[in-house]
Amino acid sequence: MMSMDLMTFLDMGGYARFVWPAYGVSLFSLLAILIFSLRSLKAREREFEALKSQRRGDRA
């Protein structure tokens, strides 16, 4: 009985072929944005640290 309920859910009322790819595209897009943002953050942190150490060198 439970598997029939699951199959009904996964079928999405006959719209599964539209719904599941939309979920997939959305998930892929969100993951791509997350990865891009984390890489950008790390690059900015390295740049900030370089500027801080350069400024410390100027003061000496």
Image (cartoon, rainbow, N blue to C red):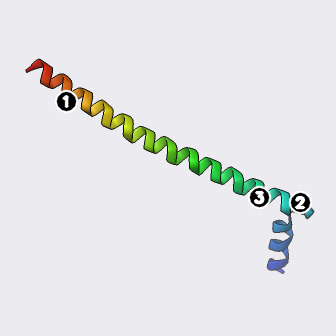
Q: Are marks 3 and 2 in contact (CB under 8 Å)?
A: no
Q: CA distance from mark 3 to mark 2?
A: 11 Å
Of badges 3 and 2, the one in the foreground is: 3
Q: Quadrant of residue 17?
A: bottom right
- Give how far across and how far down residue 48 sits, in percent: 31, 30
Q: Residue 53: which numbered mark, if any?
A: 1
Q: Are marks 1 and 3 in contact (CB under 8 Å)?
A: no
Residue at the far top: name it.
59
Say above or below: 4 vs 32: below
Amino acid type, residue under disc 1 in the picture: Ser
* Residue 58 vs residue 8, the one in the foreground: 58
Number of residues whose C-alpha sits closer than 10 Å to that of mark 1, classed few (under 14), some (14–19) or many (20 or more): few
Sequence-first tag of 3 and 2: 2
- Give how far across and how far down residue 26 sits, in percent: 69, 50
Q: Quadrant of residue 41?
A: top left
Of badges 1 and 2, the one in the foreground is: 1
Judged from the image, the secondary structure of the residue bearing numbered disc 1 is helix
Amino acid type, residue under disc 3 in the picture: Pro
Return the residue at label 2: 15
Sequence-first tag of 1 and 2: 2
Say above or below: 52 vs 5: above
Q: Residue at x 70, y 57 (%)?
A: 24
Q: Quadrant of residue 57?
A: top left
Number of residues whose C-alpha sits closer than 10 Å to that of mark 3, classed few (under 14), some (14–19) or many (20 or more): few
- Give how far across and how far down residue 43 sits, in percent: 38, 39
Q: CA distance from mark 1 to mark 3?
A: 48 Å
Using residue 4 as the reference point, say whether residue 24 is left or right of it.
Answer: left
Using residue 20 as the reference point, say whether residue 57 is left or right of it.
Answer: left
- Give how far across and how far down residue 40 sits, in percent: 44, 39
Q: CA distance from mark 1 to mark 2?
A: 57 Å
Judged from the image, the secondary structure of the residue bearing numbered disc 3 is helix
Using residue 46 as the reference point, say whether residue 15 is left or right of it.
Answer: right
